[in-house]
Image (tube, helix red, strand yellow):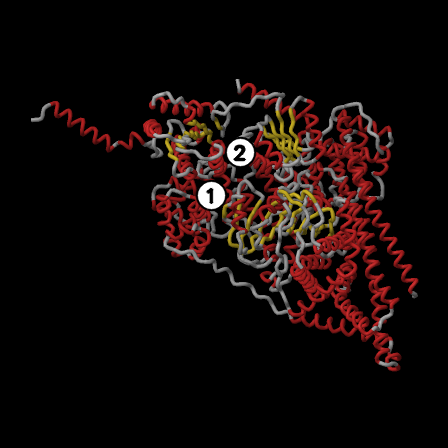
Amino acid sequence: MISIKEEIRLQIEKTKESMIDHMDTFILDENTETFNEFFLREYLINFININSLKPSDRNPILMVINIDDISDINARYSNDEGDETIKNLGYLINQVKSDDQLLFKRKGPGYILFLHDFKGKSIKDYASVFQNKVKSSEAFIEAITVSIAVVKFSEIDTEMDVQEKADILISKCNSRINKSSELYSNAYISDDKPVALKSLGKVLVVESDELLLKILKMSLEKQDYQVTAVSDGVTALNSAKKYLYDAIIADRYSHKIDGLRFKQYLNESSINMNTLFIMTVNNKTVNIVEKANLLNINYILEKPIIFEEAYGIISRELIRKKYSNR
Amino acid sequence: MTLEDVLVISLVLLIISIVLILLIFLQKKLKRRKQIKYLHIQELLTKRYQFFEDIKVNCSLITYIKNFFILTQRIQLTQVALDEAYNFFLKKKLIHKLLKQLNSHNEYKRKRAITYLSLFRNKVTSKALIERLSIERKEHIKILIVNGLKRDIDKTVLKSIITSLINSRRYYQLRVIKILKKYIDQSEYDLSEYFKSPLIEIKESFIELSMEIYHPSFEKPLIETLKEIENHYLYEDSTLLKNIRKPRVDRLYRQTLTALSTYYGFDISSNKYLAHTDIEIARIAANSLIEKDNIETIKTLASFASLTKNDKVYSDAINEMCQNNKSLFKEVYELFKIEKDKRKKYLLSGVLSKKIDYLLLIVEDDNELTNLLEAMINSNYSVNIINWLNQNKDYELEENILNIIEPIAEDNYEFYLELNSYLKKDIFKKMGYIQTKYPGQVKPTTEPEFRKFRWLLVILLILTLSLPTIFFITKIRFIFSSSITQILTQYLISINIWFIAYYVFVNLLYIAFAIIALIEYKRQENLWEIKSEDFLYENGVVSPISILVPAYNEELNIVESIRSLLSLKYPEFEVIVVNDGSKDKTLEVITKAFNLKRVDYNTEEIIHTRLVKAVYKNKFYSNLILVDKDNGGKADALNVGINFSKYDYVCGIDADSLIESDGLLKMMSSVLDHDEITLALGGSIVPANGATVDHGLVEKYEMPKTALSRLQTIEYLRAFNTGRLAFSRLKCFLIVSGAFGLFEKRILKEIGGYLSASSFKKNTVGEDMELVVRITKKAAESSLNYRVDYIPMARCYTEVPESFKILRSQRNRWQRGLIETLSFHRNMILNPTYKANGLFAMPYYFIFEMAAPMLELQIYLSLIIGIIFGIFNIVYLLLLLVATCFLGMCLSMISLFVQEKYSTPLSFKDTMILILYGIFENFGWRQFISMYRTWGYFSSLKGKHTWGHMNRIGFKK
C-alpha cells in the first residue's frame, strides 16, 4: 500500500517526465518550430551568466525582425496565410543568417535573431541585408517588408541582476519594434541619435548638367536650404555616406552612378536610407516608375523641372518629419 | 616640269598646311571662349526669367534665343516669364524674322523657326504653326510642329493635326497619336466622327488612339469597325478595306479587338477568338480575361492547352491573373492536383513554376510534390527548381527534392544535362553524379569558296600585269628600238608619272571628301542644337532600341560596359548581352554583378543560330537580358541578340567599347530629320587609349602615350571625320562600324541577319560592312526610299592596338573583311540598279581600298630598284613625294580642323602632338599600313578565316 505522500511524489515524478517529453511544446513555437520568447529569456539568462564570469570582448546584439504588413495579409487572404508568411520568413532568415546566430520566434509576427558576437562594421548595413532579401523574395504569397529593431547588450546597465538584464533586453526589443508601426514600413530602429539641423534643411543635388545644377542650387539656397551640389553619382554617394540629408534630388542619368543605382546603394547603406528621394527624369515611363517603387524612391519629377514642385515636396516632407519627431 | 616648279608646289602646300594649323588653334580659342560666354549668358537668363531680377543680357539676338532655348530645356518657366521674353524678341523684331523663316525653303531654317516659336505658346505663334502645318509636306517637320502645338490643343489645333494625317506614313501617324494621347483632353471633343472618315489613315490613327484612351463615344464606331473587318474577311465587301494589304487589315483587326476588350468590356472570350489561328488574336482574347481573375476563367484558359508554344499565350494570362490576385496560386495548385489531362497539367505547372519557392515550402505531401515537379520538369519549366536548390540551406527539404528529381533526371537526358550545367557541383554530387564538361553543339560547316578564290586570283593577275601591259601598249615603238636599260629607265619613270597622277587624284578626292564632310558636320550639328529634350523624350517620338552586346572572353571590362550602357541617356531601350561561349568567367561576373537569375524563355528563332543554352534576368534590371550560347563568332552572337530583341531597332556594340552617354540619342534622333526609312546608322569610333575612364564615363580625353596609338588616332580621325561623313552625304555610306552601329530590325529579318556559318553556311570577318552592303542591296532591289547614314556626333570610345603584332592582325582582318564583302557582292560594282552604292562606293572600295595597295607595292618596288641602280628622275621623285606626303599633310590638317571644330577640344599640348603626327604619318606610316593591307589580300587568297586576337589593356581608370 503506497502512502499518499509517496503517491504524490510519484505523481510529481511522472508529471515531470511527461513534461520533459512535452518540453518542446513549451520552448518551441507551434507554427514555426523555432525557439520561442520564453526560451529566449532563459537562454539570455544563461548567456549573461556565463559571459559575466569571464572577461569578454564580445558584441552580442538582439535583432528583431518584424513583418510590416501581416494584418493586410491576414485580412486579404486568411490567418493561415499569415502563419505561412511568418513561417516562410523564418526559412528566409535561416538562409541569410550565419551559423553562430540563433533564431527565436517572438510573440508578434516576427523573429528575434540573437547575434552572439557581431563583428561587422555596421549593424544597420547588416539589417538592411535582411530587409532587401525579404523585399525581393518570392517565398511569400505576395511581396512583404520587414522592420528591424536592434538592441545591443552594451546598452544595459551592468549593475542589474541577470534576470533583470534579460527582461530589459526583451522589453527594449518589443518597445523599439512597436515604434516601427508609427513610422513607416521597412524601418530600422536603434539607439542612434537624430542629427541636429542648423538650416531649414540639408539637400543633396546630383545633376550632371552644369546649368541645371547651378539653377537648382541657386533656387534652393534662396529658400534657405543648405545645398550640396555635385555633378556625379560617385561624389554624391561619398557625401551621402558621411552626412544625413533631409532631401536628395538626383538625376536619373547622373554621371558615373545613375539615380537609380545611387538610390540602390543608399538603401544598402546605414545613412540616408529613408531620406526623401526625388529623382528627375526626362520622361516618366511605367518602367521607371516600377523601378522607382522597388527602390522606395519618393517622387519622380519630369524635366524641364517646375522648381515650385520640387520645393513644395521638400518643404512638405520637412513639416511631416517635424511632426513625426514630436 | 622643272625642279623649281616642284619646289613652288611644295611651298604652296606647306603654306596651306601652316594656315590650317593656325586655323586649328584659332578655332580652339574661339570655341573655349564661346563655351564660357554661353554659360554666363545662361546664368544671367536664369536670374532674369526664373528669379525676375532686373538684369540686362548683352549678346546678339540669335545667341540670346539660343541660350533662352537651352534654359527652357532645364526648367519650366512661368507664362509671365515666357510672355516677357516674347515681348522682348518682338520688340527686337526677331519674332517677325522667325515667322518669315517658317516658310523658308531651307529645311533647317524652318525647323529652327518652329522650335523657337514653339517656346512662347501664344495665339500668334500657334496660328503661324497651324498655318505651316497645313502646307508642310515633310513629315519630319510636321511632327515638330505637332510637338510645338501639343500643350495648347483646342478644336482648331486638333483639326489641323488630324488633317495632317491624311496620306501620311505610319511612322508619322504613330507619333502624332502618342502625342495626342498624352495632351488631348478628350472630354472636350467628340472624336467619334473621325471613325467615320472614308480615309483609311484617319481611321487607323483613331483606332490606334482608341487603344490608348477611353471615350464612351468610341464604343459604337469600334464595334462597327470590328463587324466591317469580320465581314470583309468573309466576303471581301468593304470599300475601305479592299484596297489595302491583308497585314494592314489584320493589324486593324487586332487593334480594334484590343481597344474594345480593354476599355469597353466587349466580350471576346468565345472560342472564335480564344482559339483563333492568328496567335495574336488568341493573346488579345486571353488577356481580355485577366480582369476576370477567378478559377473558372483559369479553367477556361487551360482548356486551350495543346502542348505547343501557343500555350504561352494562355499561361501568360493565367500568370498575370495570379500576380494580380495572389490567392489564385493556391487555387491553381488545387486545380493542378485534380487535373488528369496532361496538356492542362503541363500548362498549369508552367504557371506554378513562377512560385516554386513558395510551393516547396507549403506542399508537404511527397506524392503531390513529385507530381508537381515532374510536370514542371517535363514541360521545360525546371529553371526555378534548380535556382531554388542552388540557394537553399534547408538540407532536409533539399534531400526530399533530390529524391524526387533524381529518377526524373535518369529518364530525361535534357534535364540531366541542365542539372549538369547549372546545379551546384556539391548538390549534383549528392544525386550521385559527377559534373562533366558541357559537350556543346557540333560546329556548323561552311561551304568552300572556290569562286571567291578564282575572282581574287584573276584580279591579282590583272593587277600584276596591268602596268607592264599599259607600258607595252603605249611604248611599243620605243620598246622595239631601245636597249634594256633604256626600257627599264623609261618603265620606272612611267610608273612614277602614273603614280603621281594617281596620288594627286586620290588626295584631291580625299580633300574634296573633307570639304563635303565639313558641310555635313555643320548641318548635323545645327539640327542637333535645335532638338529639344522635351521633344526627344516625348513618348514614342524616338524609337526604342535593343542594344546588342556580343561578349567573348570579356571578364575584365564587361561589367563596367554594361553599367555604362544601362545609364545611357535614352528614353527606352534594352541591353541584350550575348555570351558567345566565353572560356573565361564572363558569364559568372555578369550574373554576380547584376544578381541575374536563370529564367525560362520562349523565343522565336527568326534567324538560325548556334544553340542558346540559357537566359538570365533580374526583376530590377528589367531592361537587361543575358543570353548564354555556344561559341559561334560575333555575327552569330549578334543574330542571337536580334532573335531576343523586342524593339524595332537594334544597335550592335562591342563589349569593350564605351558609348558617350547621349551617343545613342544623337544617333537615333537623326531619324527625326528625314522622311526616308532609316535602315542603318553608324557612329564615330574614337581611339581612347589615353582617356581616363571612371565608372563608364570618359572623364578626361588625352592623347595616348605610344606613337603607335597616336598614329592610329590621326588615322581614325581622318577616316571617320572626313571619309565616312562624305560617303554618308553622298548617299553611299557602306561601312557601319561593328563597334557602334544601328539597324532597322525588319530589314535584318528580311535579309537573314548577319552573315554567319549557322545562317548562311558562309563566314566573314567583315560582318559589319557585309551586312550594310546586303541591306542597301536589298533596299535598292525593293525600291525602298531609305537612308544609311553616318552620325559623327554619336561617339563611341575604343582601344586601338598597342603592338605591331596585333595591329597587323587587325588590319589583315579588316582587309580580308573588305575583300570578302566585295567578292560576295561583286555584281553590285558599276551596277546602276544600286545607284551611288553601285556606281561610286563599291568601285571606290574596289579600286582604292582593295586594288590600290597591290599597285602601291609595285611602285615601292620600282622605287627601290630605281634607287639601287641609280635609275630615277629627281624631279619626278620629288613630285611623287609632294603628291603623297605634302598633299596628305594638308588632308590630315583638314581632318584635325574638323575634329577641333565639332568635337570636344583637346588640350594645346595634345593638339600639337596630333599636328606633328599628322605631318609625320605621311612619311612612312601610310605606306606601312598599305603593306599590311597587301598582306591581307594574300591571306584572303589563302582562305584565312580567323579573327586574330586583340589583347586589351583596359582604359585608364
Residue type at tag 1: Lys
| CA distance separating discs 2 and 1 | 31 Å
Residue type at tag 2: Ser
Q: Specify the quadrant of the image occupied by residue B734.
A: bottom right
In this orientation, which residue lies closer to the viewer: A295 or B762?
A: A295
In this orientation, which residue lies closer to the viewer: A234 or B630?
A: A234
Quarter of the image where the N terminus of chain A is located: top left
Where residue B263 appears, as percent x and y from the top left, is 59, 36
Residue under label 2, please give it. Answer: A269
The disc numbered 2 marks a residue on which chain?
A
Q: Do marks 2 and 1 share a subunit?
A: no
Q: Is residue B760 left or right of residue B792?
A: left
Residue at the top extreme of this rendering: A326
In this orientation, which residue lies closer to the viewer: B327 or B257?
A: B327
Residue B547 in view, yes or no: yes
Residue at the left extreme of this rendering: A1
Residue B246 in view, yes or no: no
Q: Are marks 2 and 1 in contact (CB under 8 Å)?
A: no
Where residue B518 appears, as percent x and y from the top left, is 81, 49
Residue under label 1, please give it. Answer: B354
